[in-house]
Amino acid sequence: MAANGSAMADAYISQTIDSVKFGVVDLTPADGQAAGFTVEGPWSSRHTSEYLIGGVRFSSQASVPAGSYVANGNAGTTYFYDEVYPDWGFVNVLSGSIAPGNWVSTGFTQSRRLILAPHSLLSVSGNYDFSGHGDGMATTGSLVVDLLGRSVRAGGSIYNYTSAEDVFHYSLVNNTDESMEVSVQLKAAVRFSGTPAVLSAVPEPGAYAMLLGGFALFGMLAARRRPVQPRSTSRSA
């Protein structure tokens, strides 16, 4: 039970991004200059969590009021695959119980720097798998891919509200005569909200009859109360 006496709702979300690959296309093969890219260091990771409890936002689970959110097992953990270039990926899991009217989210931003050769097209592709379920709760997952170069930006996003599998493929072009530093960012996030679906009550057949009867009664009363307009008469001299 939650601190406010309301029943807690359970949810489990799993988000997988894997088989992340980089590719390159030579845009000017006849110029004799090789296209390609070089990787500058490993992936870097940044984790963020956010909780909305009673209308107040918290950035750590330790600061959340007791009884409002209970993490289950491997909540908020990320499993990184052993990197075997160029394949790479990770799993993001969020599991727990939350009181109605509140929500919790967790996200990871993975970044990597590359140097893209002149007149080259850089592509980033991979697989995306999202699975979320709960006791009438709203579960969402998202993936944003940003390719940031010098005065050039490309990428896109995927949003899922139910279990789904998808693939992503985005590219960035260097049309200049100089090498370009490119930042590749994968921003994955999952969220669940303790707000169950509200179902409207279906009136019984007798209620419909009473409703129609009420409308008829109001109509009769309105007709009786309508003032009678006096008839105009004219007298001849």
Image (cartoon, rainbow, N blue to C red):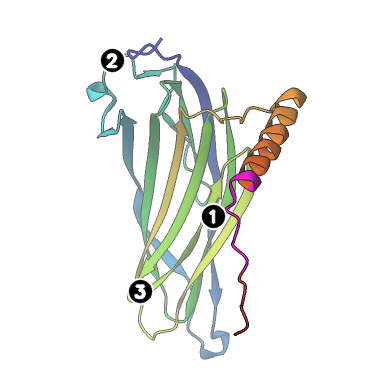
Q: Amino acid at mark 3?
A: Met
Judging depth in this view, the residue of 102 and 128 nearest the camera is 102
CB-based contact (under 8 Å), mark 1 and mark 2:
no
Q: Is residue 165 visible?
A: no
Q: Measuring from the top left, give residue 10's x and y in whole percent.
A: 50, 20
User: Distance between the Cα atoms at labels 3 and 1?
Assistant: 19 Å
Q: Residues within 10 Å of mark 1 (few under 14, many from 20)?
A: some
Q: Which residues are magenta?
A: 223-231
User: Distance between the Cα atoms at labels 2 and 3?
Assistant: 50 Å
In the rendered image, the quadrant that contains the N terminus is: top left
For the point 42% across and 60% down, the residue is: 146
For the point 42% across and 75% down, the residue is: 117
The mark that comes first in sequence, 3 or 1, is 1
In the rendered image, the quadrant that contains the C terminus is: bottom right
Q: Residues within 10 Å of mark 3 (few under 14, many from 20)?
A: many
Q: Secondary structure at mark 3?
A: strand
Q: Amino acid at mark 1?
A: Lys
Q: Which residue is mark 2?
A: 66
Q: Secondary structure at mark 2?
A: loop
Relative vertical location of residue 219 with respect to residue 49 in this rendering, above or below: below
User: Which numbered tag is attached to residue 180?
Assistant: 3
As drawn, the residue found furthest toward the front would be 237
Q: Which residue is mark 1?
A: 21
Q: Amino acid at mark 2?
A: Ala
The mark that comes first in sequence, 1 or 2, is 1
For the point 63% across and 37% down, the residue is: 163
Q: Measuring from the top left, give residue 43's x and y in whole percent.
A: 37, 48
Q: Is residue 62 visible?
A: yes
